[in-house]
Each structure stands twice: as structure tokens, then as C-alpha cells.
Image (tube, rainbow, N blue to C red):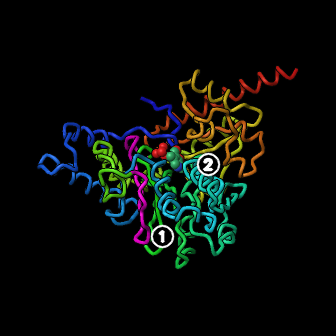
Amino acid sequence: MTMLYFDFNATTPMSHKSKMAIQDVLDQFANPSSRYRLSNHLITLIHQAKESVSQLVGGLPERIIFTSGGTESNNLALHSVFGQLPAGQLSRYHAICSAIEHSSILEPLRWYQKQGLKLTIIEPSKTGRIDLDTLCNAITPQTCFIALMAINNETGVIQPYDELAYRLKGKGIHLHCDAIQAVGKWPIRCFDDIPLTISFSGHKFYAPKGVGGLYYSQQVKIYPLLHGGGQEQGLRSGTENTLGIAGLAAAAEEANEKLIQRFDYCREMRVYLLTQLDKLGVNYHLNGETNPEYQAPWTLNISFPGIRAEALASRLDLCHGISVSLGSACSNNSQTPQRSHVLLAMQSPHSYIDSALRISFGHVTEWKAINVLANALQQETQHLLSISGEQKI
Ligand SMILES: Cc1ncc(COP(=O)(O)O)c(C=O)c1O
């Protein structure tokens, strides 16, 4: 079947191996915390899954905590820094984050800000990348935490997380990297000589939803969000999601094996899609990095001047069966439609923001789907432009 799904940054389909790994443990219902033999296999499964997943971040398996996904992992990292500060002391501390972080970073940070935390938000360049000098100039003697994502979910712009980690050596500042759009697709490095946390989420790399994790370096003390039965060395209570963990491990192994191959495939696809659009004479503007080194190839944040993105996305869906996103799918839950905070921070003109689609794909996307997408975009942009032209008359 040709996949006309172009929203891989929102979520990915489960891989065959991930499904098979889940199927293999479907009947192994025992609680991993129990002490009988029935549980032994599940304890081993969890340990082995940590081995597989730790290879994606190059760290030690015992420093992985399995969670319910990216949102929980980000909250856990923040809570580990701010939750353990003495009550009423937050105003003595300073945090820095980029303006383009996901809401699961921005919202908890704003919550702590309301409790007194000093917060500096760093705006990106017009191409969506954070400038390291600007970020580091914001560091004060009170700075205890910096959040910088690895790859932005709306634009696919790769952020200078590695260089920041180098610059923070010896400073004792906790760096949190939301690597949810990177782990499983892009080589992420962990640094054990700084206080560092890295979050990831299975459903972004062909594992099931509801499972993810947090990597924490040796210098980090995790302060649990969930207290109870003491699972995950007491750092995340709750009976382990063994099915999800089995699927996550299988997807992680595949990603590890095929990271470069998958990346190269997406790079070729991006070039092909843009070439097709050019050949068909579609008028578009790409929001994001012009330097391909800083741009994840599987994401295109693309504006079609003169067109409402909602109208275009609906027509692609209804007339062609094509699924694309308007900016971030994670913010689609908001009651009142809001302009993308990422494109606003990049100072994109409103005309670009209101006409922007996020097209994201993966190694399972077929070439012929790209042809269908390019043709549909040409047909529908022309149609919508002709209607708005008629309305003006
Ligand atoms: C960059 C980023 N962070 C966090 C999340 C939240 O992850 P989850 O859906 O696993 O809670 C997402 C989801 O799209 C994301 O793209």
C-alpha cells in the first residue's frame, strides 16, 4: 500500500519487528516485580531493552529510566532539578531555555517561573537555530539549568546541543536535551562529565506509543515524579510497561543498525520532493535551515504564500487521502488555534505562518507517495489560489 501519511514527526507506524517483539511477550503477563520464575524473563527483557536503547545515546544501560513517553521524561528531568530545591528558594535560581522548545518543556518551566524561578528564553535565528554565544551570554552565577532540544519538531532544525555540552564542562549547570525528534533517527551523544539528561519517546521511532525514557548522567540525581512501588530503582514507580518496552527495544535495535541508511534515504527523498515541486511550478517557501548540515531531511516546514494552511491540509486529506500537519501536532489540542510559537520566534511573517504545512516522512515512505504528494500540492495550491483570486474580483 502506498503510504500517504506525511506526519512522521507526530508519530510513526510501528515497525514489523517492534510488533513481533510485542507479540512474543503478549502472553507473558507476570508482574516483573514478583519473585517467582514467571517474572524472570520479564526482568531480563527490561535489562536487555536498556542495553539496546542505551546504544542509541551511547551511555550506560543502568542510567536509563523507562517512562510513559516524552512528556513524562521532560517533566521528570525538570522536576529532578527544581523539585528538590527547598520550598521558597526558587527565586535564587536561574534557568535558560530556547523559545522553540516543546510545550512539555516550556509549560513546566513557566510553572516553576510562577513559583519564583528566574527564566531566560532565548530566541532562535530567522532560520530556527539557537546561537550558542547568545545562549551562553545569558548564563549568570545563579544559572542551574539549561534546556536545549536536539532537533525541533516543527522545523526539523538541528540545534547545537553537542557544542553546548562541551561549553558547559566544569560549570555544574544541568543540561537537559529533549532529543525526542532525534533519538532513533540521528546520532545523539551523551556526555558523562556534565549533569545531563536526555529524553526520548518510542512512538517517534517506530515503537509503540506510551513508552519512552530518560537518560541521566552520573552527575544527576533523579528526583522521582511518581512514588509508589519503587520500580526503576525507585526513580519511577509503577508496574513496567513490558509490552511497550519489548517494542521499544526492537525498534531501538533496528534504528541502531540502520541509522545512516535511513538518514540517507530521507535526504534523497527531500531533494526529490523539492525537485518535483520546482518542476511543477509550485510557489513555496521553506521555513528552516538553508544549511543542510543543520536541517533534518525528513521534515519540511513549508509555506505556500496566499493560501490558508487549514484549507490546503483539509483538501489534501479529503480529496487525496494525504495526512500532513499544520505546524506542531502536539499543539493541536489547544482550544483556541494559535500561531506556531516556533515560527513566531523565528520572526516568520504571518503570511508564511498561516500558510505553513509540516510535511514529515520516514524510511518507510515510498517514492511514489512523494509523486502523489507533489502532484496534489500543485493541484490544490492552484485551486485555492484561483478561488481566492475569484473572491478578490
Ligand atoms: C520535541 C518533542 N518533545 C516532546 C514531545 C512529547 O512526546 P510524547 O508524545 O511522547 O509525550 C514531542 C511530541 O511530539 C516532541 O516532538
Answer above or below: position of 114 versus 359: below
Residue 268: tell me if it is visible.
no
Q: Earlier in the sequence, mark 1 or mark 2?
A: 2
Q: Mark 1 packing: few (<14 Cα in 10 Å), some, or many (20+)?
A: many
**Tags 1 and 2 in contact by the CB under 8 Å rule?**
no
Find residue 230 and report its image quarter.
bottom left
Residue lying at the far front of the rendered structure:
88
Which amino acid does the dot numbered 1 rest on? Pro
Give the residue number, with chain letter if any, for mark 2.
155
Give the residue number, with chain letter if any, for mark 1.
195
* Total tally of numbered discs in the picture: 2
Residue 208 screen position, x and y as percent: 37, 41
- The span picked out in magenta is 205-226
Label 1 or label 2, whichever lies nearer to me, is: 1
Residue 155 screen position, x and y as percent: 61, 48
Dot 1: what SS?
loop
Which amino acid does the dot numbered 2 rest on? Thr
Residue 255 screen position, x and y as percent: 38, 52
